[in-house]
């Protein structure tokens, strides 16, 4: 099933795959999100299984919160995560709107690979903690790979490593609408007999790899960064939204939908939202000038795939065969565990020279409907690193005024500066 919003069969994106690169960029630039299939079209389910276990952990957590008052009382309030590198990096639990919105903000301890805050561990136990860490690692890798493609494409489009700026650089095609011929013109394809474009593409790719590995905080230790802090800047947030209608006269409401978390953008490189069983994420599509629900698209894609395979499209699971030792077993994986919505954040907007805009998104729910549990990961910048424009973006004259202002800044300072003014110290 083809869609203007795109579906990425995820393995490892290659910058030599021009078609996949254009597909990714068109979805991000034109529509502010990308739906990712972690199973490569149903051929491998290892990552989907990890997300399935993470969803079980999240559901069990909220079930315990509901059924045992002592569990909620044991959870710490939201507070600054000591060791993360920013006063805006928090962990803890919050409940508001008479319980209609509940948030658990967790992070990974860099040295121990344990979940912070530590009070959560006794609630979700060691298995649940490992489930959270495994899902975090899967989504970090997918997000980093998408960021790498976006930054490399921006570098190549603007001739960042060409050694000089072409007289007609302003006439190069935008990456959101590249054709195969345009890709050659822009230097993405290896077409120059002298190797100029090929060399530019290679260096652009290598620079993008450096940026993703050095700047994006995947919760792991980098030996060359002594100031990275002991806790990851990238949070794994477990949320529950209940569509309660607290209006005095429900008959006056015009719709059965309620906005439970208002429109905003994220201070992240990429926000990875595993598709939930109860949809509710909406992304604003500037091209169409309307709100779009990528989780519903994921369901449509799954149903279409099932129909092509001659399977029941009204079902809710994929049956996966695996080996437990020498014994062959089957397990049912919920359909939504295959899919992730990738949304660009403000840091990606900066590092792609405003080519990829941060996604404006919100959460809606059915009034008096089923609760929605969500588990987004916000890929943020690793504390202690500096924005080195020549290293990551080549010719400094190609970066534009916004990115140029960030040159030499610590990435945690950039993160802090992007926070709303009423949240600043």
Image (tube, rainbow, N blue to C red):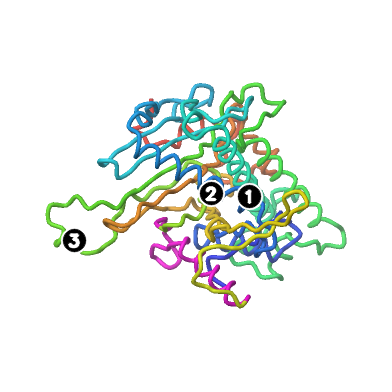
**Separation of marks 3 and 1 at Cα, in angstroms:** 40 Å
Name of the residue lying farthest toward the left: 249
Q: Residue at x 59, y 63 (%)?
A: 318
Whether the residues at callouts 1 and 2 have beta carbons within 8 Å, the answer is: yes
Q: Is residue 200 above or below residue 296?
A: above
Q: Where residue 102 sits: x, y (%)?
A: 36, 40
**What residue appears at the point 68 percent right and 51 percent down from the top-left corner?**
152
Neighbor class of circle 1 (other Cα within 10 Å; few <14, some 14-19, many 20+) is many
Pointer 2 residue:
272
Is residue 191 shown in magenta? no
Q: Residue furthest right?
A: 194
Q: Nearer the viewer, residue 277 or 16?
A: 277
Which SS class for mark 1? helix
Question: Which residue is under mark 1?
Answer: 142
At 59% from the left edge and 32% from the top edge, which residue is drawn? Answer: 382
Q: Specify whether 240 is left or right of 316.
A: left
Segment colored magenta? 280-309
Left or right? Give the position of 195 relative to 69.
right
């Amino acid at each position: 099933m083809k869609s203007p919003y795109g579906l990425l069969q995820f393995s490892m994106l290659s910058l030599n795959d021009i078609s996949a690169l254009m597909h990714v960029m068109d979805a991000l630039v034109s529509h502010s999100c990308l739906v990712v299939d972690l199973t490569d079209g149903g051929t491998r389910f290892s990552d989907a299984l990890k997300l399935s276990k993470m969803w079980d952990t999240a559901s069990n957590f909220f079930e315990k919160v509901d059924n045992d008052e002592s569990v909620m009382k044991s959870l710490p309030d939201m507070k600054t995560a000591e060791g993360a590198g920013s006063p805006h990096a928090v962990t803890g639990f919050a409940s508001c709107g008479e319980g209609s919105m509940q948030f658990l903000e967790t992070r990974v301890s860099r040295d121990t690979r344990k979940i912070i805050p530590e009070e959560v561990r006794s609630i979700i136990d060691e298995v649940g903690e490992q489930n959270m860490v495994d899902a975090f690692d899967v989504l970090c890798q997918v997000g980093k790979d998408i960021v790498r493609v976006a930054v490399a494409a921006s570098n190549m489009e603007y001739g960042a490593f060409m050694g000089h700026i072409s007289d007609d650089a302003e006439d190069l095609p935008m990456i959101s609408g590249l054709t195969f011929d345009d890709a050659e013109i822009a230097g993405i394809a290896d077409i120059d007999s002298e190797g100029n474009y090929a060399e530019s593409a290679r260096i652009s790719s290598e620079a993008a790899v450096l940026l993703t590995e050095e700047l994006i905080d995947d919760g792991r230790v980098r030996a060359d960064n002594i100031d990275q802090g002991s806790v990851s800047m990238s949070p794994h947030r477990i949320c529950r939204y209940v569509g309660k209608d607290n209006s005095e006269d429900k008959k006056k409401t015009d719709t059965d939908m309620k906005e439970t978390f208002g429109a905003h953008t994220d201070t992240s490189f990429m926000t990875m939202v595993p598709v939930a069983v109860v949809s509710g994420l909406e992304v604003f599509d500037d091209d169409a000038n309307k709100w779009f629900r990528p989780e519903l698209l994921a369901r449509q894609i799954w149903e279409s795939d099932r129909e092509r395979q001659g399977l029941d499209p009204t079902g809710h699971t994929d049956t996966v065969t695996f080996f437990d030792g020498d014994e062959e077993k089957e397990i049912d994986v919920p359909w939504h565990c295959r899919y992730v919505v990738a949304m660009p954040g403000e840091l990606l907007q900066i590092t792609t020279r405003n080519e990829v805009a941060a996604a404006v998104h919100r959460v809606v729910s059915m009034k008096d409907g089923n609760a929605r549990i969500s588990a987004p990961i916000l890929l943020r910048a690793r504390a202690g690193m500096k924005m080195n424009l020549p290293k990551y973006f080549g010719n400094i004259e190609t970066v534009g005024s916004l990115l140029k202002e960030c040159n030499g800044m610590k990435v945690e300072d950039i993160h802090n500066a992007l926070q709303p003014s009423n949240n600043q110290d």
